[in-house]
Image: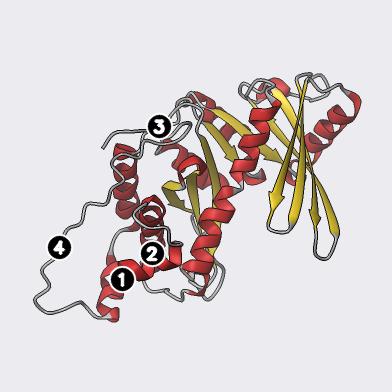
């Protein structure tokens, strides 16, 4: 039962332990399952799930931990319930999630999620919502590094980073080309160590570098070229290849977690609204997805594995 995956999470104990329940009255009805699940305390459910994963999945040095939020679109008449998850891309594993309070946003949920993880030696990547001094400070305090996206919500800060990329010489540059699925994607990563054009740079915990990612995507059908430029700040040293890989891995939380939950589990179509049903069922979906992705007994996709397990 030994073995590790480089730059990821210890996987040895991710062999599911099956427990056969005696159900003399047969399998409970849909309504009974819904009532029981809606009555459970979601905080206790999340705490138990997180403790289980953390106890058997040790984050190793260099692992990229992507943090992002996802709305449960069908769970309320007005507004949407949002959950923030931490995803380890190297192992296709969601390690912990937290709910965003109704009258709050992801900025308040992310610190709670970070507090539930042993992050030492990892690299935490967060979208622009998490580009906050307090969050960067909390990550560094946990002996981890960060890569934070900077967008229009940090208007003046973003302009300073853009000016730096245009006026200063990059300390490291890396190029990456990907082929597949009828498209070619080329990415250039430029890293700048000079922070002289960034006001109050010292107020960001351990801020070391500015990062510019320019990407060009060519779709063979219909022969269209798309370009995009994104900016980041990081506490890492100017290793352009590593930063390029880490930022690219961040998108796996969208492709492998959120997309799978929406398309394969139909989460956005779920209309559960009673009690805590929506949040608890969402956690159960993520636990199931973790188990299915760790299963290596067959070469089926997630949908096929679900049918086989049933």
Judge the density around disc 1: few (<14), some (14-19), many (≥20) Cα neighbours within 10 Å: few
Percent coordinates x, y for residue 142 in the rendering = 47, 26
Query: Which comes sooner in the sequence, label 2 or label 3?
Result: 3
Question: Which mark's residue is nearer the viewer, 2 or 3?
Answer: 2
Could you tell whether 146 is left or right of 197 in the image? left
User: Which disc, if any, is residue 305?
Assistant: 2
Q: Is 136 or 270 nearer to us in this picture?
A: 270
Q: Quadrant of residue 91?
A: top left
Percent coordinates x, y for residue 65 in the rendering = 51, 39
Q: Mark 3 and mark 4: span between their CA atoms?
A: 32 Å
Query: Which comes sooner in the sequence, label 2 or label 4?
Result: 4
Q: Residue furthest right?
A: 167
- Judged from the image, the secondary structure of the residue bearing numbered disc 1 is loop
The answer to whether residue 121 is seen in the rendering is yes
Name the residue beneath numbered marker 1. 310
- Judged from the image, the secondary structure of the residue bearing numbered disc 3 is loop
Question: Which mark's residue is nearer the viewer, 3 or 1?
Answer: 1
Name the residue beneath numbered marker 4. 20
Q: Mark 2 and mark 4: span between their CA atoms?
A: 20 Å
Percent coordinates x, y for residue 257 in the rendering = 51, 55
Answer above or below: position of 16 versus 22: above
């Amino acid at each position: 039962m030994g073995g590790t995956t480089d730059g990821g999470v210890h996987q040895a104990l991710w062999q599911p332990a099956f427990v056969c329940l005696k159900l003399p009255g047969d399998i409970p009805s849909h309504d009974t399952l819904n009532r029981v699940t809606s009555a459970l305390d979601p905080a206790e459910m999340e705490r138990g799930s997180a403790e289980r994963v953390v106890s058997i999945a040790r984050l190793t040095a260099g692992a990229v931990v992507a943090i992002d939020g996802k709305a449960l679109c069908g769970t309320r008449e007005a507004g949407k319930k949002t959950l923030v998850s931490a995803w380890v891309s190297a192992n296709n594993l969601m390690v912990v999630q937290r709910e965003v309070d109704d009258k709050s946003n992801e900025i308040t949920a992310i610190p709670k999620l970070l507090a539930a993880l042993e992050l030492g030696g990892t690299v935490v990547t967060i979208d622009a919502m998490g580009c906050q001094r307090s969050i960067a400070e909390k990550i560094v305090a946990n002996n981890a590094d960060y890569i934070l996206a900077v967008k229009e919500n940090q208007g003046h800060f973003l302009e300073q980073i853009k000016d730096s990329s245009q006026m200063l010489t990059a300390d490291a540059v890396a190029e990456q080309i990907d082929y597949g699925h009828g498209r070619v994607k080329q990415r250039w990563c430029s890293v700048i160590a000079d922070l002289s054009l960034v006001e109050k740079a010292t107020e960001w915990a351990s801020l070391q570098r500015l990062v510019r990612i320019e990407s060009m995507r060519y779709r063979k059908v219909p022969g269209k070229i798309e370009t995009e430029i994104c900016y980041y700040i990081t506490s890492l040293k100017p290793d352009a290849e590593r930063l390029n890989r880490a930022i690219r891995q961040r998108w796996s939380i969208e492709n492998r977690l959120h997309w799978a939950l929406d398309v394969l589990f139909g989460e956005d179509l779920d209309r559960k609204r009673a009690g805590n049903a929506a949040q608890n069922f969402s956690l159960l979906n993520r636990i199931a997805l973790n188990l299915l992705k760790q299963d290596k007994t067959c070469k089926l996709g997630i949908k096929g594995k679900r049918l086989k397990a049933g």
